[in-house]
Amino acid sequence: IDANAFRINGTTVIDSSRNATFALINSSTITATSGSDQRVLKLKQASAGTGNIIQFLDQNNANQWEITGRNNGFYIYKNTGTGSGMRYQISSSGSHTFTGDATFNSGFISANDRIEVTKTTGNAGIKLISANTATSYVDFGDPQDTNIGLIAYDHSNNEMFIHTNATEALRLDSSQNATFAGTITSNDGLYAT
């Protein structure tokens, strides 16, 4: 301990500006116990627009991943290798944004393994946005065929189509004309106007 800093083995732990640095070496851990004896790690924003960051380093002290809290938002960054950049964000309004593929494994979401969008006081929806030359789609699959069913919208010509058994079954063009691939059956007769 000196007039400007607190040091352990020559390493500054708390500097003169009261910034604290804790290094975990080898198999060391920080543990927060449960119950009434909880331990809370608090990181306070220095000023508006600044952030609090937790970094995850490899054995060579290279920054691999980091978690950032900034402007009432929460961010996860991948800092090296393929797909580097922001990977996940929770905005100040509570919306969630994934960058790249997001995979939810069995049991992660609920006992029924589903993604559920609920808003009991108003409308609820799922929005898929792609380039105006690309296709937005939802695949339905099983272990033997991961896209045996499909609902898709082709933005290049504004057509929607449905696949069953990995084959196109129905297409609706931009003028709302329908093309069926199979037999159309009706017990009460089929009428066209």
Image (tube, rainbow, N blue to C red):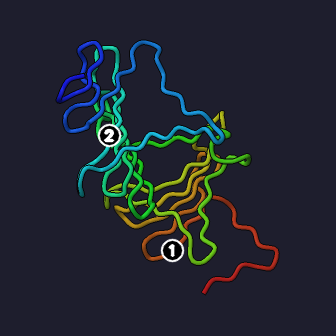
> Which is nearer the eye, 69 or 96?
69
Q: Give the x, y percent position of residue 125.
A: 54, 67
Which quadrant of the view contains residue 124?
bottom right
Q: Residue at x 36, y 44 (%)?
A: 43
Q: Identify the amino acid type marked 2.
A: Ile
**SS at badge 1:** loop
In the rendered image, the vertical position of residue 153 relative to residue 74, given as above or below: below
Q: Residue at x 63, y 83 (%)?
A: 192
Which quadrant of the view contains residue 62?
top left
> Which is nearer the eye, 76 or 112?
76
Badge 1 vs badge 2, beta-carbon distance below 8 Å: no
> Which is nearer the eye, 154 or 66?
66
Q: Give the x, y percent position of residue 88.
A: 40, 46
In the rendered image, the vertical position of residue 15 relative to residue 115, given as above or below: above
Horizontal side, residue 48 vs residue 108: left or right: left
The residue carrying mark 1 is 177
Q: Which mark is residue 53?
A: 2
Q: Residue at x 26, y 25 (%)?
A: 6
**Badge 1 local density, few (<14 within 10 Å), some, or many (20+)?**
few
Q: Give the x, y percent position of residue 41.
A: 44, 39
Q: Earlier in the sequence, mark 1 or mark 2?
A: 2
**SS at badge 2:** strand
Quadrant of the rendering where the N terminus is positioned: top left
Marks 1 and 2, Cα distance to the nearest angstrom?
Answer: 54 Å
> Which is nearer the eye, 134 or 60?
60
Q: Residue at x 82, y 74 (%)?
A: 187
